[in-house]
Image (tube, helix red, strand yellow):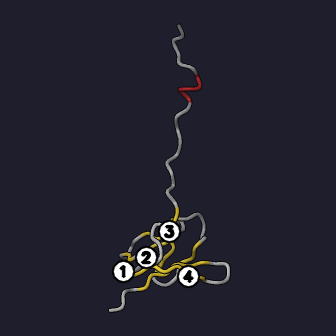
Amino acid sequence: MAHKKGAGSTRNGRDSNAQKRGIKVYGGETVTAGSVLVRQVGSTIHPGKNVKLGRDFTLFSLVDGTVKYEWRSRTQRKVSVYPAAS
């Protein structure tokens, strides 16, 4: 009998964790300040009013309010957060 396992099975089994990217909050939903809106690779969606861009292109809210996705130009989209009218 062999004293070592087959080389294939012992050298496999490592993989990186999923990045979990995508839109986290959709239009019309209410968010609190600091909430992550979108995780993305590159600036596919741009920051609008009351939204900042993180170092890894994550978009997050600066204020409590309602999320709205809008057109920045004919080809570019942006996301804004509008505070609730009081």
- Say if mark 4 contacts mark 1, CB within 8 Å: no
Q: Nearer the viewer, mark 4 or mark 2?
A: 4
Label 4, secondary structure: give it.
Answer: strand
Task: Determine contact: label 3, label 1, CB under 8 Å.
Answer: no
Q: Which residue is mark 3?
A: 38
Q: How many marks?
A: 4
Q: What's the residue at 38%, 77% (across, down)? A: 30
What residue is at 67 percent from the left and 82 percent from the top? 74
Q: Are marks 1 and 2 in contact (CB under 8 Å)?
A: yes
Q: Which residue is mark 2?
A: 61
As drawn, the label of residue 70 is: 4
Residue tagged by mark 1? 64
Evaluate if marks 4 and 3 touch, with contact meaning CB atoms under 8 Å apart. no
Q: Position of residue 31 (x, y in %)?
A: 38, 75
Q: Residue at x 44, y 78 (%)?
A: 28
State the residue lying farthest toward the front: 28
Label 3 crowd (10 A; few <14 / some 14-19 / many >=20): many
- Of badges 4 and 3, nearer the viewer stands 4
Disc 1: CA contacts within 10 A as few (<14), some (14-19) or many (>=20): some
